[in-house]
Image: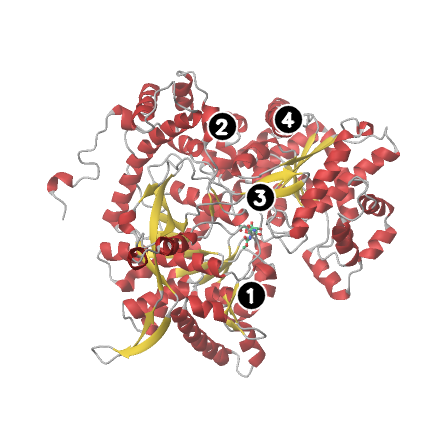
Amino acid sequence: QLPQALQPTDAGVSKSSHRTGMTVEDLKQAFLDNLFYDQGKFPALATQHDYYMALAYAVRDRLLQRWNQTAATYTAEGSRTVAYFSAEFLMGPQLGKNLTSLGIYDRVRDAIASLDLDLDALLDEEPEPGLGNGGLGRLAACYLDSLATLEIPALGYGIRYEFGIFQQDLQDGWQVEKTDKWLRLGNPWEIKRPEWGVEVKFGGHTDSYLDQDGCYRVRWVPEQTVMGIPYDTPLLGYQTATANTLRLWTAEAPESFNFESFNSGDYLGAVYEKMISENISKVLYPNDDSAQGKRLRLTQQYFFVSCSLRDMLRILIGQELPLEKFHEKFAVQLNDTHPAIAVAELMRLLLDEHHLNWESAWSITQRTFAYTNHTLLPEALERWPIDLFGQLLPRHLDVIYEINHRFIDEVRIKFPGDEARLARLSLIDESGERYIRMAHLACVGSHTINGVAALHTELLKQDVLQDFYAMYPHKFQNKTNGVTPRRFMVLSNAKLTNLITEKIGDQWVKHLDQLQQLEAFADDPDFQNTWREIKLSCKRDLAVFIQQQTGIVVDPHSMFDILIKRFHEYKRQHLDVLHIITLYNRIKANPDIDITPRTFIFGGKAAPGYWMAKLIIKLINSVADVVNRDPDVRGRLKVVFMKNFNVKLAQRLYPAADLSEQISTAGKEASGTGNMKFALNGALTIGTLDGANVEIREQVGAENFFLFGLTTEQVYKMRAEGYCPQDYYQANPELRLALDRIASGFFSHGDTEVFKPLLDGLMNHDPYFLLADYQSYIDCQKEVGLAFKDTARWTRMSILNTARTGTFSSDRAIQEYCDDIWNIQPVKVAQPDDVPTAV
Ligand code: CRA
């Protein structure tokens, strides 16, 4: 019980204007105070980074007022809470986002300008917290934004990697990786909470014993202990008082020294253990859509899941709720199988540490978890060799065997005599070396399983998870992905935001469906003009940036044709390259040919061990070198590779795009989310019927979408019937010329070896059907070129793309998760009086 004087949340807290005030004067004073008291600098010594930090802390003070208020409200009301478990959170820079959420962007700009500083330069100082690879991690970040904005109590749980996704550099057109030291200068947004640290155990063995009541129990005798220390970051909703928490765990050694080794003079041995422990949260695995059975990876997964579940039990017990109410207090979403070990860990905690019986523990577990699948690629489905698993988590292996045993009995009852089905469904893959199938554990341990786009969910049901669908049809749902308009429109495209708000008011930011009202202006010549001017102005800004970064001069009037995403063969960046080479060849054959000028912009990282993806990056840069320098081209084609694609860079690119390239092989891209960000910013899509492209096309209308390529069924059929890429090569002179040019060394200073593996792959196997889709793509690009010349038509299509993509807001997605999976309601947090009500 708290003393009376400390009862209210903010008892005794100074509300002096420099801590919480929102006027330009208050903000300026807060900034100056922080520079002095937190950075310990006076202006003559301060660096730009000191200024950034001073401003960040000033903004954080304003967040804390709401954060504490939110925590107090949730605690008082014992609110049901979403726990979003994710190995990745690709948050992007926080300062600008928080200014937008607080509604003080312009005031802070003024406050900073009154000190002769430039807000943009300070924003630029913030290092990117790159704690994710791509779509999956960014989706988690968009979802946290929507949860706070929709006022849903939520915690994001993950790992505080000391090194995030590597920084990509280019050397002679090849990707080279550099470590990402994002924490080097400190992170002003997080607060360390050592008092909530938890112990996590690994290794050892299990044994059984009889407890005082004569009950047979299993005990885990672990070998190693590490501490998980939480770092909390407040995440404020857009113009609400709700500030939820992102809680990321760092691994520390339980003792900084092993005193035995230390005393015996083995100083290095003494600190060795500390180093081993800290390795757990050291670095993010840089693989997107692929899994390798690496011990450290499983260790990371178990580490953060165990910390998080223990933390949730602490909260539950702190609120004096019984264990039996765990699933009523928390809805846990498993973001892919990375946290799927949570199913076994919650069972272990309930059984071994809290002594529930199996049936009760299993019932709680199944009612707690829901699982999102993010991929159809077989190489991305996580499996752990039994030996490795048993060495690290012997008790969990027992628990999984028991889950499997009971599950297989269930299958036998439903499908008697179907031994092949049992083998397919088993949590243990016994076809060769024995593995644990994490997707199976997630499916059995969850009440709901969802895909991330309509097509993807259908393919899960028919293909990848068909046996689970037969077993548990009621568990399957679709939840098409979404993106936050706060970051990917309001923050990154202020010009378009202002225009839209002038026309239809400001409610669309929280109710993105309202963009539909823009349809009324799609043919209005004045509106079209303004729309075009804004796009042009965004393109000019990008052109300046491109020149600064790469030295390449691009024409803002040319079509900005952009392909940005991780490099993967299924995403087919090299198909885009074949288009570029084809246009180039046409120019070489006929220099006066009439073609629509284009600037091709690429960005994206390749997994460091993914050699073919790296070769595709090299190919783009090699083609760029030739095309950009050839006088015959007369600047009509420019090829730009923007290095180190990340959230920061993404925010510059989406607003400036005319054409969005979404050209994966049908049936391979689970959803995509970049496709949504482009369409929202008025880019037209050229794409296949893959992932969420299908739904984007349905929404914007077939006439406002450039469709090409094989359908999923056609791809499946071709694969079954035997596909021969050579036939396409032989039959198509333009395709042949494009491939031959690469082979001849034309783009590689005469080197005929370098791209050989890529070409051999295409000619002999072509598992992603580039050659089959080539002509369809080229024809479609021709239509794109013609459409771009008809500016009124293009502008109309662009407006309609923005107007009709409101459904791809992450608010819509999160609302569906709340209604159909989590069964959770918003909780109102009282707004501090001095929050401005409009942007
Ligand atoms: N790589 C899919 O490939 C999808 C995102 C988010 C991915 C994308 O198509 O948009 O997830 N899958 O749902 C994934 O990471 C492990 O699987 C991705 O980001």
Query: Disc number at residue 177?
Result: 3
Tell me: residue 733, above or below residue 370: above
Q: Is residue 791 depicted above or below 351 in this figure?
A: above
Q: Amino acid at mark 4?
A: Gln
- Element class at badge 1: loop
Q: Which residue bears the numbered disc 4?
A: 547
Q: How far, Cα to Cα, is label 3 from label 1?
A: 36 Å
Q: Nearer the viewer, mark 3 or mark 2?
A: 3
Q: Farthest residue toward the bottom?
A: 417
Give me the disc on residue 501: 2
Q: Residues under labels 2 and 1: Cα distance? A: 44 Å
**Tag 4 and tag 1, C-beta contact below 8 Å:** no
| Amino acid of disc 2 | Thr
N-terminal of the two: label 3 or label 4?
3
**Mark 2: few/some/many CA within 10 Å (<14, 14-19, 20+):** some
Q: Between tags 3 and 1, which lies in front?
A: 3
Whether residue 383 sits left or right of residue 321 in the image: it is right
Q: Could one spot residue 294 in this view of the protein?
A: yes
Q: Is residue 218 left or right of residue 704?
A: left
User: Of circles 4 and 1, which is in front?
Assistant: 4
Q: Earlier in the sequence, mark 3 or mark 1?
A: 3
Mark with earlier residue (3, 2)? 3
